[in-house]
Image: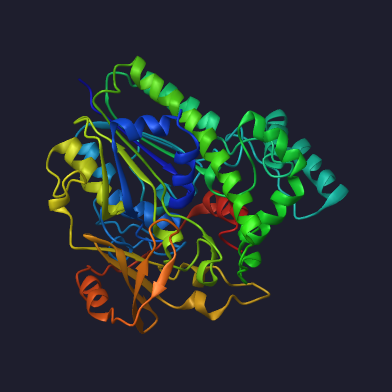
Amino acid sequence: MARTVVFVVLDSVRFDIFQTFISEYDDTFVHSLLEDGTEFRGATATAPWSLPSHASMFTGQYPREHGALRANTRITEDTETLLDVLSDEEFHTGCFTGNPFVHPDYGFDGWDEHRNHYSQTVYPDATAPKSDKSGLSELLDGMRQVLNADQRAKTFANAAYRKLRTTPPLVDDGGRRMTRDAINWLDDNAGEDLFLFLNYMETHDYHKRLTKRGRLRNLVDCDRITAINHKLGGAGISHYATPTEITERDRQFVTELIIDEIRYVDILLQRLWSKLETMDRSDDCLFILCSDHGDAFGERGFVYHLAGVTEPLVRAPLLVKSPNGQQDVVDERVSLGWLFDTIVDYAAESGNMDLFDPETYPEYVGAENTNRLTDLINGLDKRPPERYFRKRVAVYESSHPKRKYVRIGDEYGVRELDERTLTERDTDDEGEPIVQAFEDSLRRSTTKLSDIGEETESRLRELGYLN
């Protein structure tokens, strides 16, 4: 029987909102995973943003070990990745993602198939007109670019898609096409051992409902969606430089939007799973569903996912369905970076750690902010608050999920956690010994500047990561 690993990331989904989704819907693909798989309620991202978190999942190392710390760094050349191991085990590998960081430029190389354009265009082989102008000038500038393009029809379609997926928010971020392409890829490689990775960007921001009924409501709520997205970071770094505590009414509205986005992706995943069943690949499949990190809605002064290590930022949903059919709920703290060994153990039966065996868990789980913001502030008219520049580290003991040891700059502390609300209460305890022990256990890496290329840089600028 051919082996199958499917690894799905719902970008930026908060743990508490995912739990709300589970409680509100009981007829979903996610519920089938809950019934047949294992839910890890203490899963923790190694960093609060995409590049270092994904790199940890693909290497089993913490950010300061694998080197992909900031927007201009990459996984170090001598670091073994999942793709290296799976290639040795003769797996055929496919990546379908709208996330600009899961890219060979950043060390995610060696794919047999890699497609990374879904959140930007309909036709990746044609240009996607962009203009800094507004109003009629923007329209005229766009028309000029279309008329001067080699593939006018496709360029026009890309221009329309780019506009429709923002205002009014009527189309998805490419998830439907991405799922279709992944299903076709499964068909094309039916006899191979397969590793399929998908990152859905539909859940990344707060700019649209995606189910059929929800899209009609977007037209009514368009102004409100735009305002919320602007406040919480979707309008780019210059707009979330000064965080704002959102109201409870806004929080409920954002939660509603994200749950609808999750519901939409859930429908796409059911299509993918049905294909695996048709191919007789579902019974022996290792299927992983998680987010790469969460988001901040003003907790402790942070919005979006930039520099903090608060619970809403680093706690992540994680569901795993394995061929052993184990159904369980695990409350211990686990790191998303440990998925590396779990996949290796499935592929090569030589891993050092298995998420299904708590006795193999390392003592500490950690997360750090990686100082990413310092690479992105050039050219800002308004400097972000000083707290964004302070080094932040969070450490947990795997067997004590409700206790958190933190380092903020040169200060240490201990916080007690509320598992339901993800709130944190400061205590008078001293956290330095635990944080120091964790940091001392890490191997330091010399990070390497990455030549990210014009295409990747363009995507990062459009998404607001670069100025």
Tell whether 211 sits left or right of 415: right
Task: Identify the residue at image location x=65%, y=35%.
Answer: 214
Question: Looking at this view, is 350 or 139 the one in front?
Answer: 350
Residue 88 picture quarter = top left
Image quadrant holding the N terminus, namely: top left
Instruction: Please tell me whether residue 170 is drawn above or below residue 429 in the rendered image.
Output: above
**328 or 155: which is nearer to us?**
328
In the rendering, at what x and y percent does residue 407 appear? 35, 77
Residue 155 visible? no
Is the image coloured rainbow, by chain, by secondary structure, or in one colour?
rainbow
Horizontal relation, residue 143 to residue 285: left or right:
right
Residue 41 x %, y %:
33, 50
Visible residue check, residue 170:
yes
Q: How many marks?
A: 0
Q: Is residue 437 above or below residue 239?
A: below
Image quarter hosting the C terminus: bottom right
Q: Is residue 277 above or below residue 444?
A: above
Nearer-the-camera pick, 71 or 262: 262
